[in-house]
Image (cartoon, rainbow, N blue to C red):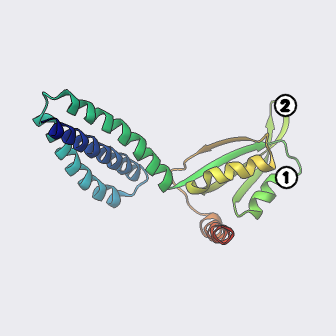
Amino acid sequence: MLENSLVMVAIIFSINIFYVSFFTIRMILTLKGYRYYAAGVSMVEVVIYVVGLGLVLDNLNEIQNLIAYALGYGLGVIIGMKIEEKLALGYITVNVITTDNGLELPRKLRELGYGVTDWEANGLEGDRFAMQILTPRKYELKLYDRIKEIDPKAFMISYEPKAIHGGFWVKSVRRRMSQEEKNEQKVV
């Protein structure tokens, strides 16, 4: 009897991890505009959900099943977020403000393949230089590291753009970034 109970707990726990991971991925795909992928994931998600919830409801008098369901849900959220971080769909825009009047930061970032638009700005403590950088999300942390290496005091803020249209970025940066990936693979 106890063995069946532990198996049921493990099944419910595992099912909920998968369900919530699929739920998280579907939500992200929906928000990013990947409607057909989101629809496909949602079909798998709903089957997993119905099976898992059915097992819990059929054995509602077993508190360990409810606990397994809740724990699986929580772990599924964490795993779903980790999967989303690895997928890194979409782009980010990073706004950077620096006191670098020699404009070394934009030049060096351009040399690294980033599309940078820069302009003069005014801050509370005087002249500043601002720039806007658009990059795929999978390069986000690398971009932050590059900026900090060049100007450790730079102010950075990032956000995800809803739509992108025009500019040199679309073709040129994608080509440069894929070339950088190839160069890194050769080094490793």
Q: Nearer the viewer, residue 100 or 80?
A: 80
> SS at mark 1?
loop
Vertical placement of 156 versus 188: above or below? Answer: above
Vertical placement of 72 versus 146: above or below? Answer: above
What's the amino acid at mark 2? Glu
The residue lying at 29 percent from left, 46 percent from top is 19
The residue that label 2 is drawn on is 125
Vertical placement of 3 versus 108: above or below? Answer: above
Q: x, y percentage for residue 52?
A: 20, 43
Q: Nearer the viewer, residue 76 or 100?
A: 76
Q: Give residue 179's quadrant in the image.
A: bottom right
> SS at mark 2?
loop
The residue that label 1 is drawn on is 103
Q: x, y percentage for residue 35?
A: 34, 57
Q: Give residue 41's quadrant in the image.
A: bottom left
- In the picture, measured across the screen, residue 125 lies left or right of residue 170, that is right
Q: Nearer the viewer, residue 160 or 8?
A: 8
How many numbered callouts? 2
Contact check, label 2 and label 1, Cβ < 8 Å: no
**Where's the N terminus, which quadrant?**
top left
Q: Nearer the viewer, residue 33 or 163?
A: 33
Give me the disc on residue 22: none
How crowded pointer 1 is (Cα within 10 Å; few <14, some 14-19, many 20+) is rated as some
How far apart are the alpha carbons under marks 2 and 1?
18 Å
- Circle nearer the N terminus (2, 1): 1
Q: x, y percentage for residue 123?
A: 80, 34
The residue lying at 26 percent from left, 46 percent from top is 15
The residue lying at 61 percent from left, 67 percent from top is 174
What's the amino acid at mark 1? Leu
**Where's the C terminus, which quadrant?**
bottom right
- In the picture, measured across the screen, residue 180 lies left or right of residue 121, that is left
The residue lying at 63 percent from left, 55 percent from top is 134
